[in-house]
Image (cartoon, rainbow, N blue to C red):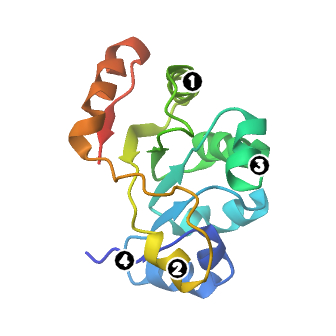
Amino acid sequence: LAFPCTGGYKVCLTNPFLTSTTHKRKWNVLIETCGQVPQKNLEEAADYVDIIYCDYKHFSGERHLELTGKDNREILDNIRWIDTNFKGDFYLRYPYIPGCNDEESAIEKFLEFAKGLKKVKEVIFLPYHRLGFDKYQGLGRVYEMGNMESLKVKDLQFLKEYENKYAVKISVQ
């Protein structure tokens, strides 16, 4: 089966043709999102989506605002909505970024939150990478992560030790 993938709910939800048509053709639809969309968009698309990968950056609304320019209330509300209402497979991802969300307390708050969700198939930690560097240069923007090196999957394997404590399946990708 084909897996059409779109980079976020905004792309997919501004084009209902994409989700409804692919589903009619028996294609699986996977969406990667940060969850920063109106909940009504989730409600409209949920029946046409098979898999959701939702990123979770920081539990603290203030720190999330500082890091991304937006607070996280809508994102957390949408994650809860997905957990309660979505019928497909739901994966919660944590982009692990040194100096931003790598402190033990932030990770433990995230895992405590994930533990309270019923439908999360797996928690996925994503090592920081520099893949956005060229994009920033092309846009003439400053890459605020400086010369920080990309992390490797092996650098985050210690996070698997949290599996038993929080009773959630954890992978590092």
Q: Which label number is shown at residue 116? A: 1
Compare marks 1 and 2 and give the one earlier in the sequence: 1
Q: Nearer the viewer, residue 150 or 30?
A: 150
Q: Which label number is shown at residue 74? A: 3
- Work out whether 159 lies above or below 8: above
Q: Indicate which label's residue lies in the foreground, 3 or 2.
A: 2
User: Residue at 78% across / 43% down in the picture?
Assistant: 73
- Work out whether 140 lies above or below 122: below
Local crowd at mark 3 within 10 Å, few (<14), some, or many (≥20)? some
Compare marks 3 and 4 and give the one earlier in the sequence: 4
Q: Indicate which label's residue lies in the foreground, 3 or 4.
A: 3
| Residue found farthest to the top | 165
Residue 118 as seen in the image, left or right of residue 75: left
- 2 and 4 marks in contact (CB < 8 Å): no
User: Residue at 67% across / 48% down in the picture?
Assistant: 67
Cα separation between marks 1 and 2: 40 Å
Cα separation between marks 4 and 1: 31 Å
Q: Secondary structure at mark 3?
A: helix
Q: Position of residue 82 (x, y in %)?
A: 61, 47
Instruction: Identify the residue position indicated by label 4 in the image.
Output: 27
Q: Secondary structure at mark 2?
A: helix
Amino acid type of the residue that numbered disc 1 sits on in the rendered structure: Gly
Local crowd at mark 1 within 10 Å, few (<14), some, or many (≥20)? some
Amino acid type of the residue that numbered disc 2 sits on in the rendered structure: Gln
Q: Indicate which label's residue lies in the foreground, 4 or 1.
A: 1
Rendered image quadrant of residue 116: top right
